Amino acid sequence: MPEYRILNVRQYESGAALVTAILVTFLLGTACIAMLSAVGASSRNTTDVLSETKAYYAAESGIQAAINVFRNNSVNYNQAAAHPSLQYDAGNFPAGLTYTNGRVVVDGESSYGINITDPDNSAGAIGYHTQGTFKLTGTTHALDPYTSTLAVISGSTTFTFSFVSHTQTTVTPGMLNGEPFGSIQVVKTGTATALPAAVNFRIDYVMTDPREGTRTIRGTIGTNGAVTFVANTFTLMGSTITLCNSSAGCAPPSGYTLSLAGSTSSQAVYGKMTALEPYRLKLVSTGYGPSGSKKVLEAIVQRNFLNDLGSSSAISLLGPNAFFATGNSTNMDINGGNLPSVTVTDSQGLQTVLDNRRVDHMLPPPEIAGNDIPDWQQSPSTLDALVRQLRQSAQNSGRYFSGTAPSGWGNFSAGTGITFCEGDCTMSGSSTGGGILVVTGTFRTSGSPRFNGLVLAVGRYVDANNPGGIVRNGGGQENFTGNIVVAPYDPNNLSAGFEQPRYDQRGGPGDTILSDVIVDSAFDGTSAITDFVLGVAEK
């Protein structure tokens, strides 16, 4: 009889379902943990991004706040560099920002701090050299060029003038004593002891460091040898140049005299210079947000488009054979201060100005432009670059007018504002304005307008009805303080050079043009064209 074995059914259960369930449960748990971790990380990232965004905006606020201090609180760049945080201090820096615990608070969650430096070390050593030229005074010599040596003949005696240049030197600005600026020298052959006519001289002070620029110091040698200067102080890029009597201390240059009795005489010239004012600043704004977030923005802020180089005369006529007419008004005054009343670019233009001027009402006398012409006037290319910048600034600030009369002309008393006329423009009646006015067509005036700043007329001659330049119509007493530059050119052909400039003031009796030049500071604080950001980088 066969043998039967009874088996337990559980013997065939291997447990695979249990393992699978456990594995699935583990995977689901892992996924849940990963999902929860991702959600937490995403939440933290979102919080971090929001915090960093707030820090970034706070840093941007710092840059804008600094620019506001420059533009509206009468803070120059020397002051800013001396107070790098721009922190308010009632005794020393009342125009600054209010800090709390080392930061300027934007709101309850964000703040910023400011640090300002001068990237060009404008307060550092000054490198310079000098050179000099001469010409005879008087109407018969008005067209004579300035030369490095000048022979003046008086009967059988010859006086030969020359300038002993001062070679390149580096000095510390703000020194107490005068530094050598070279010397005026005269060599005589013969027995005469007086000059038949006075001699004009120009001494070019050429700065090479920390920036490049030239300021021309003008003066006269009288018939008895007395040396006088147009002024005792001059400015260049915020630096004050003071003429001195000797190398010991810096007394005013009184008693400067060339002895005409001996065969050779020399008169040394001395001067001292203060530090330049920075024309740009490096502004680092650190923004702070929630959760310890921080953003650092670095910006370069520039003072103005002109690099602190204003025009080198009251009225600059750039281009060949300048047209210049003032009519018969006895009230016509053009005053250049310590600079020429009018400068032109060639002898033909100078002859025209001399033929149409009133001698007693144009001081100092007109002349051909010297070496101190600013870089933005040296070619159509450099001037066009400036005009383009001004056009863009005017468009950005709603001060661009094409085919319509300007709604205003800027602020006369403060000398601020920008007005850009694309095409012809007329300023009439008792209108007042200030800052910078650019006209690309014909700029017409009538009545008694007043303007304080820079007038830049670049319109070309089209025909008699649209001659370009500046044209006066009718009587009145207008007053222009600052600089007038007439420089027509073709923006589509910059290599062609400047065209004939026109300054036509034959409008009628009673005209008064008073151009009292403020060379370097006439444009400071002009909204939309000063204290602008060249670029921003996140650090």
Image: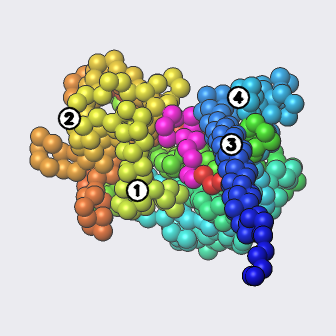
* Location of residue 465 in the rendering, given as x and y in whole percent from the top left corner: 11, 40
In magenta segment, residue 390: no
Front tag of 2 and 4: 4
Report how far apart the C-alphas of labels 2 and 4 lie in the structure: 43 Å
Seen from the viewer's position, the closer of residues 203 and 18 is 18
Badge 4 local density, few (<14 within 10 Å), some, or many (20+)?
some
**Sequence-wise, which precedes: disc 3 or disc 2?**
3
Look at mark 1 in the image and give the residue it sits on: 385
Q: Locate the C terminus by quadrant.
A: bottom right
**Sequence-wise, which precedes: disc 2 or disc 4?**
4
**Sequence-wise, which precedes: disc 2 or disc 1?**
1
* Location of residue 285 in the rendering, given as x and y in whole percent from the top left corner: 71, 44
* Location of residue 314 in the rendering, given as x and y in whole percent from the top left corner: 45, 42
Look at mark 4 in the image and give the residue it sits on: 106
Query: Badges 2 and 4: C-beta atoms under 8 Å apart?
Result: no
Query: Badges 2 and 1: C-beta atoms under 8 Å apart?
Result: no
Report how far apart the C-alphas of labels 2 and 1 lie in the structure: 23 Å
Query: Badges 4 and 3: C-beta atoms under 8 Å apart?
Result: no
Q: Would residue 187 be seen by someone viewing this image from the given angle?
A: yes
Q: In this view, does 257 lie to the left or right of 448?
A: right
Residue drawn at the location 75% of the way across and 82% of the way down: 1
**Tag 3: amino acid:** Ser
Look at mark 3 in the image and give the residue it sits on: 43
Q: How many marks?
A: 4
Residue 71 quadrant:
top right
**What's the magenta region?**
524-535
**Tag 1: amino acid:** Ala
